Amino acid sequence: MYQAKSLGRNTYSFFTKEMNTIMLRRFEIEEQMHGALKRNEFELYYQPQIDVKSTNIIGAEALLRWHNPVFGDITPDEFIPIAEQTGLIIPIGQYVIKQALAFLNEWQRIDQKKYTMAVNLSPIQFRDLELLGFIKNALSDAQIDTCNLEIEITEGVLMSGQSYIHDTLVAINKLGIKLSMDDFGTGYSSLSYLREYAFDVLKIDQSFIHGIPTNKSDCSLVKATIAMAHSLGLTVIAEGVETKPQLSLLEGLNCDSVQGYFFSKPKSAEKLLEFTENYKRGT
């Protein structure tokens, strides 16, 4: 039934052994997820963000990883949708916010720099009436200035048009927390959303960055996106920067900052502190 619905409704789909295998794995992952937080199986990794002109580290994006003793490493692409469907994304999301801010406090203290931490929010998290209060308390507990937290959302958060989402985004902005449009260019109504909400940051999806050294259309799109964002007073981050030619082109296009494998893969908290220390020394 769900397979038929996913194909656009008013159709039919035959049940197959492959579907059965997929559903069994989904149920098994859901079962494991229920106790994963208590068993400390989740861990945050951090991918540094680099200022293009100065090449200084300006912050990082927090990325959730799950190391399960039964299934090993489970990718976010697989477990996040299950967490959203079951509602477990609420406590997991709270864990991410709290851990990310606690690490940011340590990182800022060690390096004596006001780094920014970017955290992704799921559409489901906006249904949590305690979300805003939790973020406020987490910032206070970690002694982090609101301007050093960046909330990343995709267009999927906005497309439902629910009033509680609008109200929460307005409240987040009033607190001084940065708001970032993630995966820009992969949705349908980006321009109207940029006009409606007070975004601070626009992140260009890595699918556009990959081909800019050789694909004229991709390069033209990125150039236009950066110019448009700057005209709106937004800072631009390019995701998925993996090569020197990509970085050089983005510098020429006046992109503000980048993240990607060219500088660093996502790292554990401990490894990121080591990376930052070595990066400052140029090693």
Image (cartoon, rainbow, N blue to C red):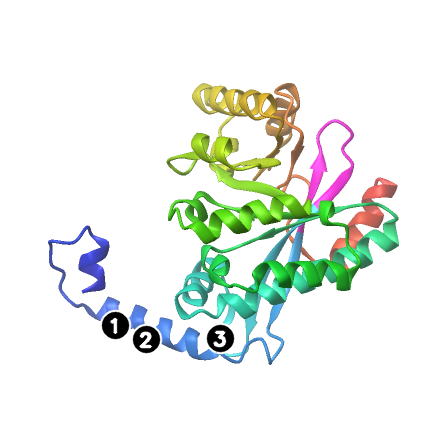
Query: Which quadrant would the C terminus be assigned to in this image?
Result: top right
Neighbourhood count class around disc 3 (C-alpha, 10 Å): few under 14, some 14–19, many 20 upward: many
Q: Which residue is mark 3?
A: 33
At 86% from the left and 54% from the top, the residue drawn is 109
What amino acid type should be assigned to the residue bearing mark 1? Asn
Q: Amino acid at mark 2?
A: Leu
**Pointer 1 with pointer 2, Cβ within 8 A:** yes
Query: In the displayed structure, would residue 118 be above or below residue 78?
Result: above
Q: Secondary structure at mark 2?
A: helix
Q: CA distance from mark 3 to mark 1?
A: 20 Å
Would residue 62 appear left or right of 76 to someone viewing this image?
Answer: right
Q: Residue 192 at what x, y percent from top left?
A: 43, 32
Residue 103: % across, % down: 75, 60
Quarter where residue 185 is shown: top left
Relative horizontal placement of residue 278, taking residue 134 as reference (left or right)? right
The percent position of residue 133, horizontal first and vertical second, equals: 63, 62
Can residue 269 be seen in the rendering of this structure?
no
SS for dot 3:
helix
